[in-house]
Image: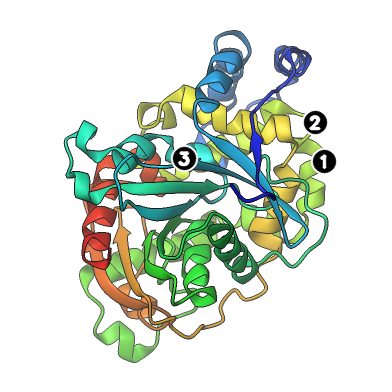
Amino acid sequence: MHADIQPFRIDIPASAVDELRRRLRETRFPPALPGDDWATGVPIGYLRRLVAYWAETFDWTAQQAALNEFPQFTTVIDGQTIHFLHIRSSVEGALPLVLTHGWPGSFVEFLDLVGPLTDPEAHGRDMADAFDVVIPSLPGFGFSSPVAEGGWDAARIGRTWATLMERLGYERYGVQGGDIGAAVSPEVARAAPTRVVGVHVNGSMGMPLGAPSEADLATFTPLEFDRLARVQTFMQDEFGYIAIQSTRPQTIAGGLADSPAGQLAWIIDKFHAWTMPHEALPETIIDLDRILTNVSLYWFTETAGTAAYIGYAQHSAWGAVSEPSGVPTGAIMFAHDVGIFRYAERENTITRWTDVTDRGGHFAALEEPALLIDDLTEFFRPLR
């Protein structure tokens, strides 16, 4: 092991867990707005139920023990502590694969992928499709915190991941990610085009941030019109959290770092808005303990502000068009995703594009792990 890589175990003090439960029990809930429904945010009745479950039923100690079953490490790159999971396959010649999460997620997003990717035969898959898995926590997220300086945009994180993989001794590897991870993964390929064999993303690629041209609109398919309409709805009805996190991350952190109920509401709002089917409650799609493990990481590491800062305030290149790296790139777009191929191919060398129109939301690894594994496995198979 490289001398600069240190083993890491999660060890949240019992006093911190007790403090969380005390704060949850003492939550001061606001009066419900008319209707008390999702049109104005997280319904207070629903939030009360989740807060009660988090305080009285959720078992952080058990979740922490489960997380610590995965080998974890830290290393310092470019002055920043990087936390990561590193699970080697027992299959000789397994392809290394970097999985990058987004906001409001964490490395917890990928836990259900580790077994099938590292030991495919035990999960009814072909042994030849085995991967070594590396799951870093983005700078400012979870245990890759605090951040000492700005400038941590997707390109810099991409260069950092390339350094991490070099430090781990990998000459060739693939990358995969969603949300912020879908922006970072292509940047790893731009930083190390001779080492990255392929880039695979879910969602968040090829989003039309501006108004499409008349020429484009004249040739849009029904699917493309649907995705365009959902982008426009998002910009009108849901953009508020981006405006706040990209311009006032410190302000929002002042509330979220002090109130676990506030942190929960801020995150569960997105788990409701971005999962499919949209009308379902998040815990009917993703296990509630998994959601609360993710929220607990934000709470215990006090990273509401740093995650917002890195995830949104540092994206100075939003809207800019980058040159393709030349590295083969695959994408899977689930039903809630809004990526459009014609825009994605301007910046990426797309060799595989999969549209799933009947299922799946933004949190692919949590909602549709089997379909995600199928697609990335097929994409990387000829690139090994």
To which residue does mark 3 refer? 109
Identify the secondary structure beneath mark 2: loop
Q: Is 5 on the left-hand or right-hand side of 365?
A: right
Can the viewer see residue 279 in this picture? no
Q: Quadrant of residue 193?
A: bottom left
Question: Spatial distance from mark 3 to mark 1, Cα to Cα?
Answer: 26 Å
Q: Position of residue 344 (x, y in %)?
A: 38, 75
Residue type at mark 2: give it: Asp
Q: How busy is the neighbourhood of tag 1: few (under 14 within 10 Å), some, or many (20 plus)?
A: few
Q: Position of residue 95 (x, y in %)?
A: 34, 55
To which residue does mark 2 refer? 258
To which residue does mark 1 refer? 254
In percent of the image, x 70 and y 14: which residue is there? 21
Q: Nearer the viewer, residue 70 or 156?
A: 70
Q: How busy is the neighbourhood of tag 2: few (under 14 within 10 Å), some, or many (20 plus)?
A: few
Residue 263 to residue 145: above or below: above
Q: Is 215 on the left-hand or right-hand side of 168?
A: left
Residue 136 to residue 288: above or below: below
In percent of the image, x 55 and y 65: which residue is there? 162
Which image quarter is the C terminus in?
Answer: bottom left
Q: Is 300 on the left-hand or right-hand side of 286?
A: right
In percent of the image, x 55 and y 19: which residue is there? 65
Task: Point out the frontmost of discs 3 and 2.
Answer: 3
Question: Spatial distance from mark 3 to mark 2, Cα to Cα?
Answer: 25 Å
Residue type at mark 3: give it: Glu
Q: Quadrant of residue 214?
A: bottom left
Residue 336 to residue 11: above or below: below
Identify the secondary structure beneath mark 3: helix
Residue type at mark 1: give it: Gly
Q: Is 205 on the left-hand or right-hand side of 252?
A: left
